[in-house]
Amino acid sequence: MTLELLVPLPVMLPLLGAGLNLAVWRHTRVQRVVTIAVLALMLTVGAILLVAADDGPLVIDLGGWAAPVGINLVADRLSALMITVSSAVLLCVFVYSVAQGVADGDDEAPLAIYHPTYLVLAAGVSNAFLTGDLFNLYVGFEILLAASYVLLTLGGTGARIRAGTIYVVVALVSSLLFLIALAMIYAATGTINMAQLAERMGDIDPGTRLVLELLLLLAFGIKAAIFPLSAWLPDSYPTAPAPVTAVFAGLLTKVGVYAIIRTETLLFPDDATNDLLMLAALLTMLVGILGAVAQDDIKRLLSFTLVSHIGYMIFGIALASQTGMTATVFYVAHHITVQTTLFLVVGLMERVGGTTSLARLGGLAKVAPLLAIVFFVPAMNLAGIPPLSGFLGKVGLLQGGVEQGTGLSYTLVVGGIVTSLLTLYALVKAWNKAFWQTPPQEVSPQRLPAGMVGSTIALVALGLSLTLVAGPLFSYAGRAADTLMDRQVYIDSVLVDDGRGQGRSPEVAEEKDGAPEAVEAP
């Protein structure tokens, strides 16, 4: 068996698991076993791909149709890292949600629909990370939309339906923009395969290319919650159950960021929109964190910090340098883990204190001292306290800004430092109010479900492990950045397979086999 055969598994396994869960919908315990087994297998496959992709991208053509005619899946260093981290997060969040359901007595239906929907969401995330085709990326986003709407409205409360409606309307607008961009890209280039697009984009009119780039950035910017396209997020996420909010905050916005990274480095390597992205990054950081400082509900506070820290990732993309891209890849992996952890901790805090309002919380350190530590560690990691991974990622981004040496990049460096300090202020304020202030009413000690606490601690440990392995992880992120900045590696891996010249004429394939230098496609 070649390793390329593993590439479709992160998409196929959860879809097969979802189908099996629907077949056994009357047996919730069987559904749990199936879902945990599938997510564990996804994590195992992701870890194997993480190692294998370090030697070069792994490509498989679906249905045996070679690119660019068929749809191909590509596992390079970036996508393999995203699959591994997202699988670990999905597994921990699912264990948390199962423990919460058991503790609340929701063992049976109607929550039976949760298990297949959760796996469909996992398949959509994996498909978006692995696809080498723009239309298949659109399909991945639509899979995410369908699954996330079901998860967001679980329970059917008025608040959740209203939040779900806002979310769906915004997502549909984003999808419509993406679809329009796809139609225009195909009309201009005759292809939607990303590797072939990378070769053809340079041949079209610069004005047309800029319009296409802006359309894609607009569509992906809504999904990534970049200011001013982020107003929907703080109103949508906090109403959902804690596990759903956690997985949304950790993963869904990062799919949008991933799409921006992939298209900006592969399709639009020029610097036509870099200044615009820098300005958007600065406003996203500052407006997001100022919104967080003003919040008195900890879920909304974390939702605003989520928005603000997307700005760091956009900053790294806009730098368009090896240093900036390395720090961005590292920071995305860090933020997926830490932001998910904090939302799970808030779910535990709500369970103990009965609310997420900081004005009505207090004294949690006395009744749940472990919870105080479990919140404090990822909070300091998100704020960027040395030597944690959040600090290392931010230092890498700031270093990239200083290396660029422009007035705008220096402004972003200052904005990044201010955002980090305000993040520290907002999270310390929340920690003090929730755990140390005198509560308005007495909080009764209670035993938290072991599964909820254990899965949260596992994610805290995963976040800390990113610090412990920061050297190797930064090195891996650097190699991933090298692959992203050198488009030819991706193009050759997709369009040329063992000299067969997929997507190119036989003459070009033969010329490439006999020459040490890359040959441009006709």
Image: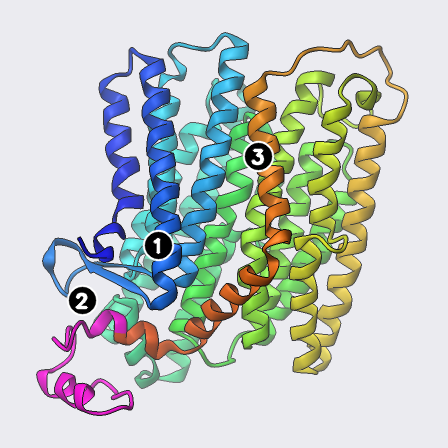
Q: Secondary structure at mark 1?
A: helix
Q: Position of residue 465 (x, y in %)?
A: 60, 47
Estimate the spatial distance between the alpha carbons at disc 3 and disc 2, rounded to whole Å: 40 Å
Asked whether disc 2 touches disc 1, contact meaning CB atoms under 8 Å apart, the reply is no
Looking at the rendering, the stretch of residues picked out in magenta corresponds to 493-522
Which residue bears the numbered disc 1? 49
Q: Is residue 234 visible?
A: yes
Task: Depth check: give the residue in front, 85 or 211.
Answer: 85
Q: Is residue 353 above or below residue 304?
A: above
Does the magenta-highlighted stretch encompass residue 521?
yes
Side (left or right) of 302 relative to 192: right
Q: Amino acid at mark 3?
A: Ala
CB atoms of marks 1 and 3 within 8 Å: no
The residue under the point 26% across, 71% down is 493
Q: Residue at x 18, y 86 (%)?
A: 513
Which amino acid type is shown beneath numbered disc 1? Leu
What residue does disc 3 label? 458
Residue 267 % position (x, y): 38, 73
SS at mark 2 in the image: loop
